[in-house]
Amino acid sequence: MLPLSYAFRNLLRDPVGLLQKVLGSALVVLLVLAAASFNGGMNELLRSSGSPGNLIFLGAGSEESLERSEVPAEAEELIAAGVPGIAAGEGGPAVSGEIHYNGLLALPDGTAAQGLTRGVTPAALRVHRQVRLVEGEWPAGGEVLVGRLAHHVLGVPAEELAVGRTVLLEDEPFRVAGRLAGEGTVVESELWFPRDDLARLLQRDTLSGVVARLEDPSAMNRARADLFTKQRLDLALAVLSEADYYAELARFYGPIRGMTWLTAVLVGLGAVFGGLNLLYASIASRMQELATLQTLGFRRGVLLFSLLQESVLTQAIGLLLALGAAALLFHGLWIEFSTGTFRMALSPGAVGLGVATALLLGTVGTLPPALRCLRLPLPVALRSG
Amino acid sequence: MNPPPPFLRCRGLTKTYQKGPNRVTPLQSLDLEVAPGEFLALMGPSGSGKTTLLHCIAGIDHPSSGELWVGDSNLAALDRAQLTRWRARYCGYVFQLYHLVPILSAFENVELPLLLTKGLRRTERRERVRAALARVGLADRAHHRPAELSGGQEQRVALARAIVTDPELLVADEPTGDLDREAARQVLDLLHELARDNGKTVIMVTHDPRAAAEADRCLHLEKGRLLEANIPAEVAR
């Protein structure tokens, strides 16, 4: 076996080549880390937003979007009375008729952005168990509750949406009455208005949907809810679990996530092919030395292992560089999209994927040139110098 | 009293290979015997097959047909992996251009073949490296890298690397071809000593009649066949 120090010293033979390999590797790993952090954050947000115990009743044909859905206002009471197995909370059944609206939010200074709003009644807290008021109080007319991450939607510091400040929806001012947290769900980026205020502002007398929490999220209870929608065809309802709704939403964003992976893979392939040229040249320049080592009695497997050691060491440097760059560039970065806000994070999964990518680059990139070199007949390889 | 059995024996050794559209036969039905401890010089014009024969004898190349016995091993019957193990144990090779690993010191270059010896302790390994370097007169250059040595010193390091495992066979391909007269003299003296004092079988390819004259016997290879060569005394001097 050749000592590891041989691999270490070989790295420094060609400092420029080493720098090229390290930077190429760091770029690919950085892109993989970015894609993994982005997709991991979005997936986690959508996954945690859907509770399997909650059912969403929407207008039939609008199952993919609450914002486009319309159900009659009386559906809320009819569902509370007619769907078996709904949980009872303090003050009534856990049924929340809601208006979901993607509207223009603004601050008095003119800062404006599209954001998700929800028109709710206090019943919403009986349904969305992960939501809690962390500051202030439930909003009265002309007031609003802001999610603890809603300031990211407007791109302003959290203080701009502190209790007592003013936020405008479609040019109408609302006083911030309180702040809510939602355990990493989409709710944390939303603004919750009194339902009547939102209905008046939007001039609508229908709801977007009704969310109901089941006592027991069994298949039987879900089937009963489904049966209810089929019995009340006059309401034109469809029902699905909140988890399924957000899973469907996650599928909707699939192409965006796919694009991030595709970008990482394409750049990665470019780097691999560029790197292969570099490695072919680098290993070919040592062909005679490798042949000499074989003449001395070193097996080809030992030499291949040593070349892989060198490559993995190079990739390890690239990996460290990429991790450092990722920590500086996007670890902890908040990303807003139409459904919510999530944080890009170097999770153990993302780091693991980065390590796997570096290992893959180190092995797959080295094998073709190394095998090509080591397969040559010894007399030919010895003459190569 | 019977002469000792040959250490190396070729019978009908033939090597052919394809070079572009042509089939080349550098060695054709070659017979050769070398006694243990003999210092044999091989001469011949370029392209006569000297290096091919040397490669076959050193287990670097594989004959196309015929027998090639070195000690108890029929090299013609060994595959590439078996030849690699055989070389590590039985053969030291000296190249014309030394072929030292540039990033390693003289000491580390000489140590390389010993890394393949199983069960050898580090202290013993180091002792053997020091002894090999002392043998070639370079104990004081142990920590120099090849770029910091002269050509003659590099070749002596290469010689130390070839003898450090104490192989029975030493093969040298024009070991003095790139050296000045004084450096060549030192290398030839060492090869001679190794054959005479240590009983090593030395086979050396050379273009230089003076170098060949140092050997116990000189053969001339021409068109794939071996002939006895006589070095004129004035050339040898």
Image (tube, helix red, strand yellow):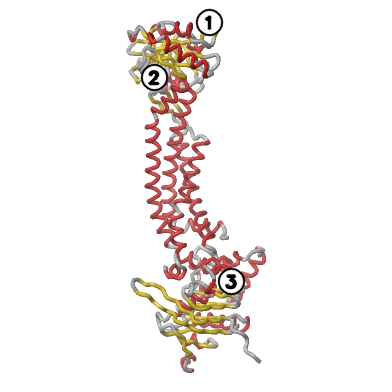
- Check disc 2 and give the amino acid type: Glu
Same chain for the residues at labels 2 and 3, yes or no? no
Q: Is residue A106 visible?
A: no
Which residue is depicted at the point 61% across and 71% down?
Answer: B165
Residue B184 in picture, x, y percent from top left:
50, 81
The foreground one among B53 and A148 is B53
Kindly identify which chain the residue marked by label 1 belongs to.
A
For the residues labelled 1 and 3, the Cα–Cα distance comes to 95 Å
Which residue is depicted at the point 42% across and 58% down?
Answer: A282
Q: Is residue A90 visible?
A: yes
For the residues labelled 1 and 2, the Cα–Cα distance comes to 29 Å
Q: Mark 1 or mark 2, which is nearer to you?
A: 2
Quick one: SS at disc 1? loop
Residue at numbered disc 3: B140
Quick one: SS at disc 2? loop
Residue B121 in picture, x, y percent from top left:
67, 63
Where is the C terminus of chain A found, in terms of image quarters?
bottom left
Residue at numbered disc 2: A63
Q: Is residue A33 above or below residue A132?
A: below
Same chain for the residues at labels 1 and 2, yes or no? yes
Kindly identify which chain the residue marked by label 2 belongs to.
A
For the residues labelled 2 and 3, the Cα–Cα distance comes to 85 Å
- Check disc 3 and give the amino acid type: Asp
Same chain for the residues at labels 1 and 3, yes or no? no
Q: Mark 1 or mark 3, which is nearer to you?
A: 1
Quick one: SS at disc 3? helix
Q: Mark 2 or mark 3, which is nearer to you?
A: 2
Residue B103 in picture, x, y percent from top left:
50, 63
Q: Is residue A186 above or below residue B5?
A: above
Crowding at label 3, few (<14), some or many (≥20) Cα neighbours within 10 Å?
Answer: few
Residue at numbered disc 1: A91
The foreground one among A142 and A210 is A210
